[in-house]
Image (spheres, coloured by chain):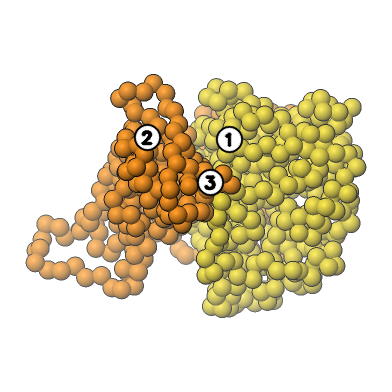
Amino acid sequence: MSTTLLPEEQPKNLHRRSKSAETKRYGFFPGCVAKESCKELFNSTMLLADKLGIELIELTAASCCGASVVNDTNRDIARVLNARTYAQAEALGLDDVITICSTCTGHMRAANKELLDSEERMNHANAILGKFGARYGGNVMVRHLLWLLIDDIGLDNLRNMVVRPLNGLKVAPFYGCHIIRPESVNGWESARNPHSLEDLVEALGGEAVDYAGKTRCCGFHIQLEKDGVAASMVGQNMRMAKDKGAEAVITPCPLCHLALDGYQQDAASRWGRTDLPTFHLPQLVAYALGVPAEKLGLNHHLIDPRPIMVERDLIA
Amino acid sequence: MIKLDIFRFDEAADEVPHRDVVEVDVPETTTVLDALEEAKATVDGSISFRRSCRSAICGSCSMNINGVTGLACKTPCNTVMDESGTIHIDPMPNFQPMRDLVVHMDPFWDKYTRLKPYLQPADKDEDHERERRVSPEDMKKLVDVANCIMCATCYALCPVVSVDPAFAGPAAIAYAYRFIEDVRDGERSERLAQINEDYLWLCAHCYACSYCPKHVDPHWRIVDVKRATINDRVMMNERGPRHALTVNKTVKQTGMLAETELIIGTIGRFNIRGLLKTVPLGLRMAAKGKMPPPFIKPIPKVDEIRTIFESLEVPVG
């Protein structure tokens, strides 16, 4: 399906070959949730980086990206918070900032685009950063770990690195809105028919399950807004995946993970039981590349992925 | 030849829908709408769909084309047909089908008319001879939204509408913005209260409505209406504004989005019943060692975050 952007809509300076890809040293922005309720995501990312032979240098003084909510009250604040993070990466001589959350990816890229598109906004941000001696020179590119895996490591290399193939495990991708939409901000692949996660699952020896819910919303951002709505969005999407034969889900976003993992039980009254375990992206990749399963924090999932892994002869 | 695989259903006669595959001899660059017109004229006159202008102005022909909702008159066949030359056409999702590709639009119109989509000037009882002038700067804010042709594409794409029809949906909120930000209008606070009651804050930030065929981009107008709600201090004790302000507070204080504080701050520290509802999931998470910490240690150099907030915060009210 054609979703080609008009030339004026192409993300400007937001996709380019980076120095980090050559040096294998990347700035790393874990985001809030990987440090709070999804620590297993942070840990499995670091274990995966070791396996890949890349260095993820955590930006320890970085703040929240704004998580789409700071925008609701003040877009300038969200933009300057992110400019501060980019300035930290530049000060460390890094030009890539790697994220492990769809929402961080989208909102950090949006802020970067706003800064790169307008000298006025960049100067405004730097005037504020200047109050504490920081400066953003506009050289940072925000990328998700998923894109790093495919662009910098490559699917063929990954395929060769697999020591424990997924034995045809049927995995449904769940992208998370902000890694694909809006296309003018992300634009790395088609937002309407993305296939990077499918390609990755197949490279790891799994079977990717295609279903209409893969690009839909998990409802995370409105989970506290009105009882039952987010759960129902989860149930609707997981029903579609289950009906197409999925045995598990993979997501590049910890917010989607929390919603999918936490709400399937509550959604069962309306959508029937689905009980699909939800892997964080680096968990499944790290497993296939040989990181011991017990180090991946699978025991922290509400819907335990281990029974289906036993059934598929992936773990004992 | 192009094959159109069309959803067929007549609510007056059919128990369940079926599909018809119709072949038409048109160039591949023909729009889906023209291919449908050809099918209706040459193959089966009973195929039903809405259309009028055929040039993306009237907003009648939005439908689901290969799973993607959009205007049939703006979609060339060669951009959507598969290798066998087939295009799958369905009515817009989130609507009750009436006949083939025609749907019942009533819920969409109801939500729109609830917002009183007409100017209500503060001085409406006074002299009607005088013109009400608007500066070009003030008008600029409204031009994009005024391009809305009410095709309901965004409403059909909205995942929140699909599970909770109480949500106003993107188009209605964008249209509310059009009058909320109109300097001539005198009902700003009533409009803000109304759109808050129609679940403004249920927007899930998914950007599905970024596929607006007229580039209205309802998402950003929804954000604008939320901001107006907070600036005008309308319904501040509801969960939406509390959620937004708690995120801001925790980021300002710690540099991080503090999950535990966010839950308590949004539901309300003294809303015991609301907080109790979060207990079952909380316990399940605690049992798996997945509870967010109760307090967040501030990030290094958190004073820089406070400097950013204090430099940019606009006094509310």
Q: Colour of chain A?
A: yellow
Does mark 1 fall on the same chain as mark 3? no
In the displayed structure, A87 sits above or below B202; it is: below
Whichever of callouts 3 and 2 sits on the residue coming sooner in the sequence is 3
- Please report, as a chain letter, where disc 2 is located: B
**Marks 2/1: CA–CA distance:** 25 Å
Q: Which residue is mark 2?
A: B100
- Please report, as a chain letter, where disc 3 is located: B
**Marks 3/2: CA–CA distance:** 21 Å
Left or right, A262 with reference to A228: right
Report the amino acid beneath label 2: Asp
Q: x, y percentage for residue A236?
A: 55, 32
- Please report, as a chain letter, where disc 1 is located: A
Q: Nearer the viewer, mark 3 or mark 2?
A: 3
Report the amino acid beneath label 1: Asn
Q: Residues within 10 Å of mark 1 (few under 14, many from 20)?
A: many
Q: Which residue is mark 3?
A: B85
The residue sitting at 50% across, 35% down in the picture is A229
Q: x, y percentage for residue A44?
A: 81, 45
Left or right, A97 with reference to A310: left
Q: Which residue is mark 1?
A: A237
Q: Quadrant of the C terminus of chain A?
A: top right
In the displayed structure, A259 sits above or below B16; it is: below
Say if residue B243 shows up in the picture: no
